[in-house]
Image (cartoon, rainbow, N blue to C red):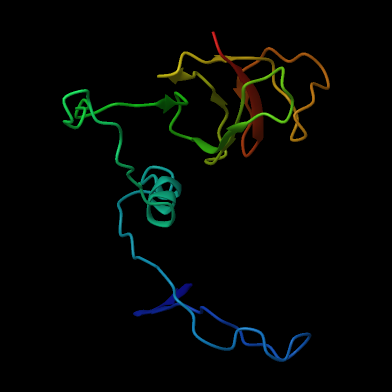
Amino acid sequence: MDCRDNQLRLSLLRSPRWPDPHCDRGWHRFTYTLYPHAGNWVAAATVRRGYELNLPLQWILGEVSSDNQPKTLPPIHSLLDLGAENLILMALKPAENEATAWILRCYECHGQAAQLCLENYFGLHIGDRVNLLEQSPAADPSLAIKPWQIASFPLQRP
């Protein structure tokens, strides 16, 4: 996307002929939005708004109580909070090894250092940082995340 004078332009497909003469041909569906805001992209939480557009909240019908009525939930509740607006949750997944319950992977999105301060509904505890292969190269008890850094942490059940 670019803008010149009084014109906005959005290029969605290139349709090159090499190396694949058939690439980008056929039907395509796109979602895009214009997000006017005051201040810079960091102050406007543009990264967060992009995730909200591309990964919308999905709901799943839960259990019913013993009297066959839906269980009620509080009007506002957080299952997982990383404690910093510039940390983006990329994955919360089962760990590859059996000694760890879950892996939390996040990244810093504003180019500013952040401190992970995990609050969660499940009572999970953060272990020492691991690499992307979920190996502990060296014990790193720090929850500090550098600008633009991807960080992975094992989470243990209590």
Number of on-image labels: 0
User: Residue 59: image x %, image y %?
Assistant: 32, 44
* Residue furthest front as drawn: 67
**Residue 125 to residue 97: above or below:** above
What residue is drawn where x is 39% and y is 26%? 79
User: Residue 60: image x %, image y %?
Assistant: 33, 42
What residue is drawn where x is 73% and y is 15%? 140
**Residue 18 to residue 79: above or below:** below
User: Residue 54: image x %, image y %?
Assistant: 43, 56
**Left or right of 4, for residue 156:** right
**Left or right of 56, for residue 93:** right
**Residue 3 to residue 141: above or below:** below
Residue 145, by quadrant, is top right
What residue is drawn where x is 48% and y is 35%? 86
User: Residue 75: image x %, image y %?
Assistant: 19, 29
What residue is drawn where x is 40% and y is 19%? 121
* Near-viewer residue (64 or 95): 64
Residue 158, by quadrant, is top right
* Near-viewer residue (54 or 61): 61
* Near-viewer residue (98 or 65): 65
**Left or right of 126, for residue 74:** left
Residue 133, by quadrant, is top right
**Residue 108 to residue 79: above or below:** below
* Residue furthest right as drawn: 137
* Near-viewer residue (5 or 8): 8
**Left or right of 89, for residue 98:** right
